[in-house]
Image (tube, rainbow, N blue to C red):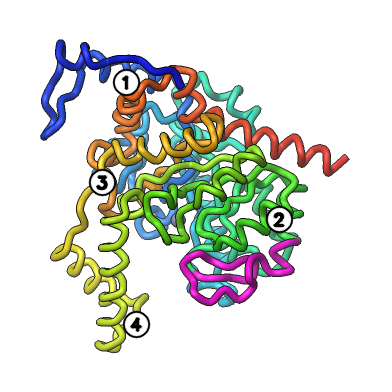
Amino acid sequence: MKKAVFSILIFTSSICFGQEYIDSVLLKRSFSLANQIFIIDTHIDLPDWLYDEWFDVSNESNTGEFDYVRAKNGGLDLAFLSIFTPAKLEGSGKSKLKADSLITLVENLQKHWPEKFQIIKSTSDIEKFRETSKILLAMGMENGSPIEEKLDNLKEFYDRGIRYITLAHGKSNHISDSSYDEDKKWNGLSPFGEQVVKEMNRLGIMIDVSHLSDSAFYDVIRLSKAPVIASHSCCRFFTPGYERNMSDEMIKLLAEKNGVIQISFAGFFLRDDINKKSIEGDKHISEMLKDLNIDPSSDSAYVYSSNYWKEHPLEKANVKDVADHIDHVVKIAGIDFVGLGSDFNGVGNELPIRLRDVSEYPNLIYELLSRGYSEDDLKKICGQNLLRVWAESERISNELNK
Ligand SMILES: [Zn+2]
């Protein structure tokens, strides 16, 4: 990262945005760079929205934070769409069915709008399609629950385009312990989870350590032959004691293994005060639901929770908070080990000011430019770092299959 001084510009051509002064020349450069740089976001929860209700993603919409028009405006090139299954389906025999339906929905995006969306399955596909005006789509599976204790299912998911798997989600499952679950039944990965890691290395599916317990992270680092990713995580440095975010030691180890942490934009991951209020609120809601004898997965629980958050809104983070997390990774591990994994469509209303949807990546580029990041630095953060890990996973897979 090279240091540059932009303060002169700020006073010569600034516009006012709320409390902040924005340098319009630098902002213009940010939009133009967002168009030129290959931008990858490794975590967008669109498929689950389509599962609830199909909508026209090819036009500008008010639904969620992703559609073709806003993605083009923000300079997004490749979105990893999240094939998410909730922890409650674990062991029910319904996880794989759900995952299969979500993958079909992603395939339908390309079928409906072939001129706008293109599914890709390898790094070489990027070269094939990057000069088109299409938004490229790849798939990451959030929660390994759909593997349903069969290694053969991994091959089936690979063939359909899954290129990373977050081994667990909100609860420990048959593969791994979860950071959110107090019951760490495996003290890391399960014996089957260890086989899953090996098979993912062999197939060329990246291992995603977001959501995992610390012990499971260390097990993955010890076992994986390929570098690993955290598809949407932040730095625990800013939220002490919060296991869902990564400690400095873990980030350094991830980097030593040539992996990458993709910073999430969720306010409660970014800032300790928001994090604490969010945890307090969740605790209050779950106690109230228990007292009122309401099933936490029911519609009435959803209404109760929505009303609670309407009455007790969390403070908003700012695009600067995201830049702070990027700065921190760069400081402790280096510029080659950080990227972007927004969690758009996955965290409700808890997105930072000036980073509210896929049209606003230029505002983050603006913030990083104003902190002195060079164009080469931005290329790495916005996509090259992730592509390095993906290409390395492909190379190791080829080697293991010789
Ligand atoms: Zn998540």
The numbered disc on residue 295 is 4
- Looking at the rendering, the stretch of residues picked out in magenta corresponds to 171-194
Circle 1 residue: 31
User: At label 2, which amino acid type do we have?
Assistant: Val
Q: Earlier in the sequence, mark 2 or mark 3?
A: 2
- Secondary element under disc 4, as helix, strand or loop, is loop
Observer-side mark, 2 or 4, equals 2
Q: Position of residue 339 (x, y in %)?
A: 48, 36
Q: Earlier in the sequence, mark 2 or mark 4?
A: 2
Q: CA distance from mark 4 to mark 3?
A: 31 Å
Above or below for 154 versus 116: below
Residue drawn at x 55%, y 30% is 336
- Secondary element under disc 3, as helix, strand or loop, is loop
Q: Quadrant of ligand 1?
A: bottom left
Q: CA distance from mark 2 to mark 1?
A: 39 Å
Circle 2 residue: 197
User: At label 3, which amino acid type do we have?
Assistant: Ala
Q: Position of residue 320 (x, y in %)?
A: 29, 36
Q: Are marks 1 and 4 in contact (CB under 8 Å)?
A: no
Q: Quadrant of residue 199?
A: bottom right
- Secondary element under disc 2, as helix, strand or loop, is helix
Task: Count neighbours of disc 2 (C-alpha within 10 A) and say few if under 14, some if 14 to 19, many if 20 or more.
Answer: many
Q: Earlier in the sequence, mark 4 or mark 3?
A: 4
Q: Quadrant of residue 322?
A: top left
Observer-side mark, 3 or 1, equals 3
Q: Is mark 2 within 8 Å of ligand 1?
A: no
